[in-house]
Amino acid sequence: MESGLPQLLMIAGFLVAFIGGIRLIVTAFTSSFLWGLVSLILHPLILIWVVLYWHEAKGPFLNYAAGWIMILAGAQLAGAIAL
């Protein structure tokens, strides 16, 4: 019987990354309406905003990154990816 730990880790990671992503977008909007709009339409460009406004973006970005690390760790445990 297979353990549910990888699936639980990936689901928790998705929730953490989702919340971190929402926090990033909200923080970008509080910084500037234009940055918030760009982060919604062209999401990869939010990385530029993170670099430029690191003092504001540090918390939400680390939250987002931690979620992705949890997702990748769960996928590794499940055998879905080989590192």
Image (cartoon, helix red, strand yellow):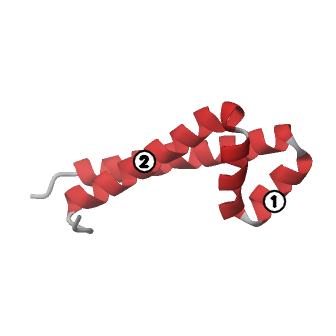
Is residue 11 at least partly visible in the picture?
A: no
The foreground one among 12 and 31 is 31
The foreground one among 52 and 8 is 52
In the picture, measured across the screen, residue 77 lies left or right of residue 9, that is left
- Image location (x, y in percent) of residue 69: 39, 49
- Image location (x, y in percent) of residue 25: 73, 47
- Image location (x, y in percent) of residue 75: 29, 60
Q: Which mark is residue 66?
A: none
Task: Using the rendered view, name the quadrant where residue 45 is placed.
Answer: bottom right
Identify the image quadrant of the N terminus: bottom left
- Dot 1 lies on which element? helix
Depicted 35 relative to depicted 63: above or below: below
Q: Amino acid at mark 2?
A: Gly
Mark nearer the N terminus (2 vs 1):
2
The residue wearing badge 2 is: 13
Depicted 49 relative to depicted 23: above or below: below
The foreground one among 56 and 18 is 56
Q: Which mark is residue 38?
A: 1
Task: Using the rendered view, name the quadrant where residue 12 is placed.
Answer: top left
Q: Residue at x 71, y 33 (%)?
A: 56
